[in-house]
Image: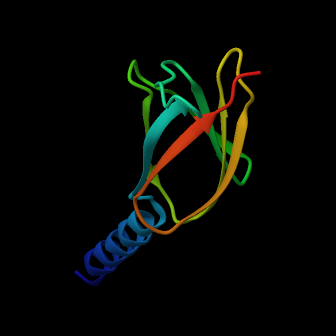
Amino acid sequence: MKIKKYVWCIFFLFFGLNSNGQGNLSLKGIVTEINSEFPLARATLNLGQGGQTLHTTADSKGHFSFGSLKKGKYQLVTTYVGFNSDTLRLNLDKDTIIRIGLKGQ
């Protein structure tokens, strides 16, 4: 009976710690041409932290979203053909919405 009790304690301890390590923050936004604010559909976004990189593409209205992020420092690189790339350094501690304006080359 005691062994069963310890197994349950270890089970809950493991899953309790594991769930705290998972992220629950989001980063959302829109990518536009800097002057006209015309949405840049299919812009590429790479969000890096600690050697790991997440990738996404803006939708037809320039909107993008990253979910399940942990608190911390990130680097977001946005690219679009014919435009200068943009690099942002972000310190996420809550859900965040941003606007990224790219300038044509």
Which is nearer the eye, 23 or 76?
76
Task: Relative to 40, say whether 28 is above or below.
Answer: below
At a point 73% along the width and 32% down the height, the residue shown is: 85
- Farthest front residue? 35
Task: Relative to 7, say whether 69 is above or below.
Answer: above
Please indicate, yes or no, whether residue 59 appears anywhere in the rendered image: yes
Q: Is residue 8 left or right of residue 93?
A: left
Give coordinates of residue 99: x percent, y percent.
50, 44
- Farthest left residue? 1
Give coordinates of residue 54: x percent, y percent.
58, 38
Q: Quadrant of the N terminus?
A: bottom left
Q: Is residue 2 left or right of residue 56?
A: left
Quadrant hosting residue 89: bottom right
Please indicate, yes or no, whether residue 66 appears anywhere in the rendered image: no
Give coordinates of residue 88: x percent, y percent.
67, 50
At a point 72% along the width and 44% down the height, the residue shown is: 87
